[in-house]
Image (cartoon, grey):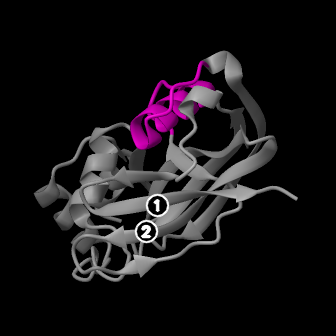
Amino acid sequence: MTGHDMLLRRITYQEIDKTELRSLLDLYGISYETWGLGGTEHVDDLVAEIADGEASLEDRDGVLVRKVDGVAIDVFADIDGARYRLREDRQVFVRDGTVKRRNLSTSLGEKIKRGETHAQAIVRALREELDITVQEADVTIGESTRQTVVSKAYPGIVSDRGLTMGAVMIPHDQVRPEGYIEHQPQKDNYFIWELLR
Protein backbone atom coordinates (compact mmCIF):
# COMPACT_ATOMS: atom_id res chain seq x y z
CA MET A 1 0.00 0.00 0.00
CA THR A 2 1.38 3.40 -0.96
CA GLY A 3 1.55 6.39 1.36
CA HIS A 4 -1.12 8.03 -0.81
CA ASP A 5 -3.46 5.05 -0.26
CA MET A 6 -2.84 5.14 3.49
CA LEU A 7 -3.63 8.84 3.57
CA LEU A 8 -6.89 8.30 1.67
CA ARG A 9 -8.03 5.76 4.25
CA ARG A 10 -7.71 8.32 7.08
CA ILE A 11 -9.36 11.28 5.39
CA THR A 12 -13.03 12.17 5.61
CA TYR A 13 -13.91 14.36 2.63
CA GLN A 14 -16.11 17.11 4.07
CA GLU A 15 -15.01 19.90 1.73
CA ILE A 16 -14.22 19.26 -1.90
CA ASP A 17 -14.55 21.18 -5.15
CA LYS A 18 -15.70 19.82 -8.51
CA THR A 19 -12.19 19.23 -9.87
CA GLU A 20 -11.07 17.45 -6.70
CA LEU A 21 -14.24 15.32 -6.67
CA ARG A 22 -13.73 14.25 -10.28
CA SER A 23 -10.11 13.33 -9.51
CA LEU A 24 -11.27 11.37 -6.47
CA LEU A 25 -13.92 9.52 -8.49
CA ASP A 26 -11.30 8.71 -11.14
CA LEU A 27 -8.95 7.45 -8.43
CA TYR A 28 -11.64 5.02 -7.23
CA GLY A 29 -12.59 4.00 -10.77
CA ILE A 30 -16.09 5.45 -10.51
CA SER A 31 -17.57 6.56 -13.84
CA TYR A 32 -19.59 9.78 -13.59
CA GLU A 33 -20.02 10.75 -17.26
CA THR A 34 -23.72 9.84 -17.25
CA TRP A 35 -24.48 11.39 -13.86
CA GLY A 36 -27.22 13.98 -14.24
CA LEU A 37 -29.12 11.98 -16.87
CA GLY A 38 -32.00 9.54 -16.55
CA GLY A 39 -33.00 10.71 -13.08
CA THR A 40 -29.52 10.51 -11.53
CA GLU A 41 -27.78 13.39 -9.77
CA HIS A 42 -24.90 15.39 -11.28
CA VAL A 43 -21.34 15.77 -9.96
CA ASP A 44 -22.28 19.35 -8.99
CA ASP A 45 -25.08 17.98 -6.79
CA LEU A 46 -22.65 15.85 -4.79
CA VAL A 47 -20.29 18.81 -4.39
CA ALA A 48 -23.26 20.86 -3.10
CA GLU A 49 -24.34 18.09 -0.69
CA ILE A 50 -20.88 18.04 0.84
CA ALA A 51 -20.59 21.85 0.96
CA ASP A 52 -24.04 22.11 2.62
CA GLY A 53 -23.06 19.59 5.30
CA GLU A 54 -25.61 17.04 4.07
CA ALA A 55 -23.09 14.35 3.12
CA SER A 56 -19.45 13.39 3.46
CA LEU A 57 -17.16 11.02 1.61
CA GLU A 58 -14.84 8.56 3.28
CA ASP A 59 -12.63 5.66 2.35
CA ARG A 60 -13.62 2.31 3.85
CA ASP A 61 -11.14 -0.41 3.01
CA GLY A 62 -10.52 0.99 -0.46
CA VAL A 63 -14.19 1.76 -1.22
CA LEU A 64 -15.41 5.34 -1.56
CA VAL A 65 -18.49 5.72 0.65
CA ARG A 66 -20.98 8.59 0.71
CA LYS A 67 -22.27 8.96 4.26
CA VAL A 68 -25.63 10.69 4.63
CA ASP A 69 -28.31 10.89 7.32
CA GLY A 70 -31.88 11.85 6.64
CA VAL A 71 -35.42 12.05 7.87
CA ALA A 72 -38.47 10.48 6.22
CA ILE A 73 -41.45 12.69 6.98
CA ASP A 74 -45.16 11.90 6.89
CA VAL A 75 -47.18 15.09 6.50
CA PHE A 76 -50.85 14.93 7.55
CA ALA A 77 -53.73 17.40 7.37
CA ASP A 78 -57.45 17.48 8.03
CA ILE A 79 -59.32 18.73 4.94
CA ASP A 80 -63.13 19.04 4.95
CA GLY A 81 -63.42 16.74 7.95
CA ALA A 82 -61.24 13.95 6.53
CA ARG A 83 -57.61 13.01 7.23
CA TYR A 84 -55.15 13.21 4.33
CA ARG A 85 -51.48 12.36 3.88
CA LEU A 86 -49.24 14.25 1.48
CA ARG A 87 -47.37 12.15 -1.07
CA GLU A 88 -44.95 12.83 -3.88
CA ASP A 89 -46.67 12.37 -7.22
CA ARG A 90 -43.67 12.84 -9.51
CA GLN A 91 -40.30 14.48 -10.16
CA VAL A 92 -39.58 16.26 -13.44
CA PHE A 93 -35.88 16.74 -14.25
CA VAL A 94 -34.92 20.02 -15.92
CA ARG A 95 -31.88 18.72 -17.86
CA ASP A 96 -33.65 16.16 -20.01
CA GLY A 97 -37.36 16.28 -19.07
CA THR A 98 -37.22 12.85 -17.43
CA VAL A 99 -40.31 12.17 -15.32
CA LYS A 100 -39.60 9.96 -12.34
CA ARG A 101 -42.38 8.44 -10.25
CA ARG A 102 -41.38 6.96 -6.93
CA ASN A 103 -43.63 5.00 -4.63
CA LEU A 104 -42.32 6.45 -1.38
CA SER A 105 -43.57 5.10 1.91
CA THR A 106 -43.57 8.61 3.42
CA SER A 107 -44.49 12.09 2.18
CA LEU A 108 -40.97 13.39 1.68
CA GLY A 109 -37.41 13.03 2.80
CA GLU A 110 -34.67 15.44 3.71
CA LYS A 111 -30.98 15.12 4.39
CA ILE A 112 -29.87 16.22 7.85
CA LYS A 113 -27.15 18.87 7.89
CA ARG A 114 -24.11 18.61 10.19
CA GLY A 115 -25.10 19.72 13.70
CA GLU A 116 -28.84 19.62 13.04
CA THR A 117 -31.38 17.60 15.09
CA HIS A 118 -34.03 15.42 13.46
CA ALA A 119 -36.81 17.83 14.43
CA GLN A 120 -34.85 20.83 13.12
CA ALA A 121 -34.33 19.03 9.79
CA ILE A 122 -38.07 18.33 9.50
CA VAL A 123 -39.05 21.94 10.27
CA ARG A 124 -36.48 23.19 7.74
CA ALA A 125 -37.59 20.70 5.06
CA LEU A 126 -41.22 21.74 5.31
CA ARG A 127 -40.32 25.43 5.21
CA GLU A 128 -37.79 25.21 2.37
CA GLU A 129 -39.46 22.60 0.19
CA LEU A 130 -43.17 23.25 0.65
CA ASP A 131 -43.36 26.69 2.29
CA ILE A 132 -45.10 25.13 5.31
CA THR A 133 -44.37 26.54 8.76
CA VAL A 134 -44.46 24.22 11.79
CA GLN A 135 -42.74 24.26 15.17
CA GLU A 136 -40.35 21.62 16.51
CA ALA A 137 -42.93 20.83 19.21
CA ASP A 138 -45.36 19.75 16.42
CA VAL A 139 -42.95 17.08 15.16
CA THR A 140 -43.04 13.43 16.24
CA ILE A 141 -39.78 11.47 15.90
CA GLY A 142 -39.88 7.70 15.37
CA GLU A 143 -37.48 4.83 14.69
CA SER A 144 -34.05 5.08 13.08
CA THR A 145 -32.36 2.62 10.72
CA ARG A 146 -29.01 2.49 8.90
CA GLN A 147 -28.11 0.62 5.72
CA THR A 148 -25.30 0.46 3.18
CA VAL A 149 -26.46 0.33 -0.45
CA VAL A 150 -25.23 1.12 -3.95
CA SER A 151 -26.46 4.63 -4.69
CA LYS A 152 -29.14 5.10 -7.36
CA ALA A 153 -28.60 8.87 -7.32
CA TYR A 154 -24.82 8.52 -7.86
CA PRO A 155 -24.23 5.24 -9.71
CA GLY A 156 -21.02 3.53 -8.68
CA ILE A 157 -20.82 5.04 -5.19
CA VAL A 158 -21.74 3.10 -2.07
CA SER A 159 -24.00 5.04 0.30
CA ASP A 160 -24.11 4.56 4.07
CA ARG A 161 -27.57 5.95 4.82
CA GLY A 162 -29.11 6.63 8.20
CA LEU A 163 -32.86 7.26 8.18
CA THR A 164 -35.12 8.47 10.99
CA MET A 165 -38.90 8.50 10.71
CA GLY A 166 -40.87 11.62 11.56
CA ALA A 167 -44.45 12.86 11.31
CA VAL A 168 -46.26 16.17 11.54
CA MET A 169 -49.87 17.37 11.39
CA ILE A 170 -49.83 20.73 9.65
CA PRO A 171 -52.09 23.60 10.75
CA HIS A 172 -55.21 24.31 8.69
CA ASP A 173 -53.87 27.68 7.47
CA GLN A 174 -50.85 25.91 5.91
CA VAL A 175 -52.96 23.47 3.85
CA ARG A 176 -53.12 23.91 0.07
CA PRO A 177 -55.77 21.43 -1.12
CA GLU A 178 -54.35 21.53 -4.68
CA GLY A 179 -50.97 20.28 -3.43
CA TYR A 180 -47.46 21.70 -3.55
CA ILE A 181 -44.60 22.06 -6.01
CA GLU A 182 -41.00 22.15 -4.81
CA HIS A 183 -38.73 23.89 -7.32
CA GLN A 184 -35.09 22.83 -7.27
CA PRO A 185 -32.34 23.81 -9.73
CA GLN A 186 -32.28 20.32 -11.26
CA LYS A 187 -35.90 19.18 -10.86
CA ASP A 188 -39.44 20.01 -9.75
CA ASN A 189 -41.17 17.77 -7.21
CA TYR A 190 -44.98 17.58 -7.27
CA PHE A 191 -46.91 16.65 -4.11
CA ILE A 192 -50.61 15.81 -3.81
CA TRP A 193 -52.96 14.91 -0.96
CA GLU A 194 -54.11 11.30 -0.56
CA LEU A 195 -57.20 10.42 1.47
CA LEU A 196 -56.45 7.97 4.29
CA ARG A 197 -58.84 5.06 4.50
Q: Residue drawn 17% across and 65% down?
A: 23
Question: Relative to the observer, which residue lies in front, 147 or 196?
Answer: 196
Range of residues picked out in magenta? 112-135
Whether residue 162 is in magenta: the answer is: no
Q: Residue drawn 26% across and 48% down?
A: 48
Q: Which residue is mark 1?
A: 190
Residue 113 placed where, x, y %? 44, 34
**Amino acid tagged 2:** Gln
**Residue 131 disc label:** none
Q: Quadrant of residue 46?
A: bottom left
The quarter of the rendered structure image containing the C terminus is bottom right
Question: Relative to the observer, which residue lies in front, 141 or 6?
Answer: 141
**Residue 3 can be seen, yes or no:** no
Q: Eyeballing the image, is 165 above or below 170?
A: below
Tell which circle, 1 or 2, labels the residue nearer the N-terminal end.
Answer: 2
Whether residue 117 is in magenta: the answer is: yes
Answer with left or right where residue 188 lies relative to residue 19.
Answer: right
Q: In whole angstroms, how far apart are the C-alphas of marks 1 and 2?
A: 6 Å
**Amino acid tagged 1:** Tyr
- Element at badge 2? strand
Residue 74 placed where, x, y %? 69, 46
Q: Eyeballing the image, is 58 above or below 78?
A: below
Q: Which residue is mark 2?
A: 91
The quarter of the rendered structure image containing the N terminus is bottom left
Q: Residue drawn 53% across and 76% down?
A: 101
